[in-house]
Image (cartoon, rainbow, N blue to C red):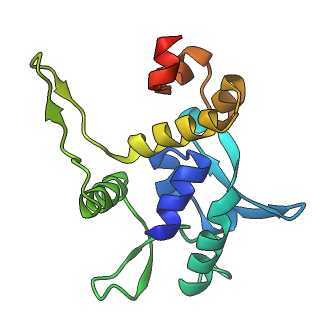
């Protein structure tokens, strides 16, 4: 779970790409580790793992995936919580895992009703992508770079992910 959460936050991988990622999709280039995935519209992408690398590599070793390139990178685990299965996790299983950890740290993952009666969505997998983008922007990334990183065709989609801080809102 730790390796999956780190992978989402540092690569902004989509849930379907994560569910379908293969152990053989890991690739080291010039000392940097990447995961090759298929995203929307069968678009092939190579995502830089960054600080997720140690967690992912520990997982690959612990799960015995180093010599199983056709196995899922994040496979299902048997009921005994030890035996790794050659079966992909479902998108729903991954989403539930994110919500489970959100609840564990005290985050309201189910959403809230606002004063005007509109329902505000809770925290989930996509929230991690949004957080990753806003963290990158807060640390100096350019919006166009974030657009490419997220795999968005248009900058408008990337702009929907941005959150104005109090200081930005005043400007």
Q: Which residue sits at x=45%, y=48%?
A: 15
Quadrant of the image for the C terminus? top right
Quadrant of the image for the N terminus? bottom left
- Nearest the eye: 35 or 116: 116
Q: Residue furthest top?
A: 171
The image shows residue 124, relative to residue 7, as above or below, that is above
The answer to which quarter of the image holds residue 49 is bottom right
Please state if 34 lies on the left or on the right of 125 as rendered: right
- Nearest the eye: 112 or 45: 112
Q: Residue furthest right?
A: 30
The answer to which quarter of the image holds residue 96 is bottom left
Q: Which residue sits at x=40%, y=87%?
A: 83
Count of numbered circles in the view: 0
Please state if 67 lies on the left or on the right of 162 as rendered: right
Residue 162 locus on image (x, y percent)? 50, 25
Q: Can residue 98 be spotted in the picture? A: yes
The image shows residue 25, relative to residue 58, as above or below, that is above
């Amino acid at each position: 779970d730790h390796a999956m959460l780190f992978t989402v936050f540092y690569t902004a991988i989509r849930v379907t790409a994560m569910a379908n990622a293969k152990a053989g999709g890991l690739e080291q280039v010039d000392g940097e580790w990447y995961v090759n995935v298929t995203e929307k519209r069968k678009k092939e992408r190579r995502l830089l793992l960054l600080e997720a690398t140690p967690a992912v590599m520990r997982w690959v070793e612990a799960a015995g995936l180093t010599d199983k390139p056709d196995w899922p990178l994040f496979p299902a685990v048997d009921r005994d919580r030890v035996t790794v299965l050659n079966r992909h996790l479902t998108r729903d299983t991954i989403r539930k895992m994110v919500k489970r950890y959100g609840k564990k740290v005290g985050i309201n993952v189910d959403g809230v009703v606002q004063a005007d009666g509109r329902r505000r969505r809770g925290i989930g997998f996509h929230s991690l992508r949004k957080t990753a983008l806003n963290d990158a922007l807060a640390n100096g990334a350019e919006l166009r770079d974030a657009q490419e990183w997220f795999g968005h065709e248009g900058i408008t989609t990337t702009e929907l992910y941005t959150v104005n801080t109090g200081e930005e809102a005043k400007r």
